[in-house]
Image (cartoon, helix red, strand yellow):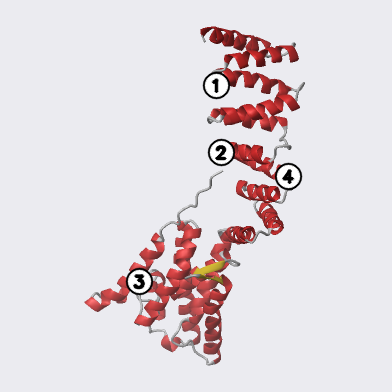
Amino acid sequence: MKTHRRARPLPIVTTSVCLLIVAGSVLPLVGVPLEALWLVPERFSLWAPLTSCFLHISTPHLAGNLLWLMVFGTLLEGAVRRYEYLLVLVGGGIAASSVQAGVVLISQPERAGSPIMGASGMVAAVIGAFAVRFFAVDMPIGRLSVPSLWVIALWFIPQVVGAVRTLAEGGVGTVGYWGHLGGFVVGMVLALSLRMTRAGARTYLSQQLVAAQAQGDLLSALRIAQAWCQLEPESVQAHLAAARAAHSLGEDDTATPYYQRALVLSDLQNDVRGGVDILLEMHGHLLTVSLPADLTLRWSLRAAQVGCAREALELLQRLADTAGGTAEGENALLQMARLTLQQLNQPDRTISLLQRFLKQYPHSSLTAYALELLRQARERAEEK
């Protein structure tokens, strides 16, 4: 079965936010006044906590925020839905600005007339959400892969140290450490509310599964895939991964229920093409193990519907031979005759199958249909 790597979506939101941030720094240089967008604690306005995120006082401040936003924002945007990412940016930015303004009003009211600016709160929220979504995944940095928690700690620890130091000194300093921590917490809360934790765990397990397979550690690969199935019991891909890992270990009895569950889930999700691919893969791998008769019959007919008539006939033949005397075995034999006549145009084989059917199931409720197929097959055989 072929798999295709999904192209990573373009970071449209991150790029747009970065352009707005750059514009917020460039416009004042060409004489465009933006004082109305400032966040000044003593004259708080509803829009200022958000608009002030796009304004910066110094170039190093601007460059640092752009760098962190591109590093974390691009990865997060590519892993979640855009509206979720936008919610983290906007909600985190507003929360961070509001927290910093509140801290100023409480701890140093004499500075309440000074503006608060910068995208650091947005960055903090993105990093907080990133910590939830990628809590145990390696980050690609050039040709290296670094644990994401290390990179997060590289940002987080200075914020805590700065916040504690300014508190000990009885002020807030010139850097909005408390706003940063507020944005980080809000980003985490939003990510948890949006259930990014499960997606993060899936990403982690997927990465570990690929690493185990690359190292040839098939037993670990099976255990990781089984953990994925427990995490997401409704995931077709999780059960397929477990089935393939078990088959690679030669444990076909273990692989069978995972293949079966993947088929059932494909049925529930109306994914006929995907289910047929799973059926054919299983048929090719597990030559001595069969699915339940009703499942085999249903998916064999679907395989024929999507153009896999010969493969469907092989599966129906196995079912007719192993489930003789049952309703599924009876139906399988009759469906074989129908397929050989209507899709493969083999009337002689159809006649043979129908004669077997009439002999094996003389009291079948489908006898009339079998006789009609037999008549059609004989007419077609005479035409040849």
Q: For residue 257, say whether it is visible.
A: yes
Q: Which mark is residue 21?
A: 3
The Cα atoms of the two marked residues, 4 and 1, are separated by 32 Å
Looking at the rendered structure, the kind of residue marked 2 is: Asp
Q: Look at mark 1 in the image and give the residue it sits on.
A: 344
In three-dimensional space, the C-alpha distance between marks 3 and 1, rounded to whole angstroms, equals 65 Å
Q: Which residue is mark 2?
A: 271
Q: CA distance from mark 2 to mark 1?
A: 25 Å
Residue at screen point 52% across, 81% down: 159
Look at the picture and state if 363 lies above or below 232: above
Question: Where in the figure is residue 78, as x and y percent of width and height?
Answer: 47, 59
Residue that mark 4 sits on? 252
Sequence-first disc among 2 and 1: 2
**Which one is in front in this view, the residue at disc 3 or the one at disc 2?**
2
Query: Horizontal and vertical percent for residue 212?
Result: 64, 60
Three-letter amino acid code at the position of disc 3? Ile
The answer to whether the residue labelled 3 contacts the one labelled 1, judged by CB atoms less than 8 Å apart, is: no
* Mark positioned earlier in the residue sequence (3 or 2): 3
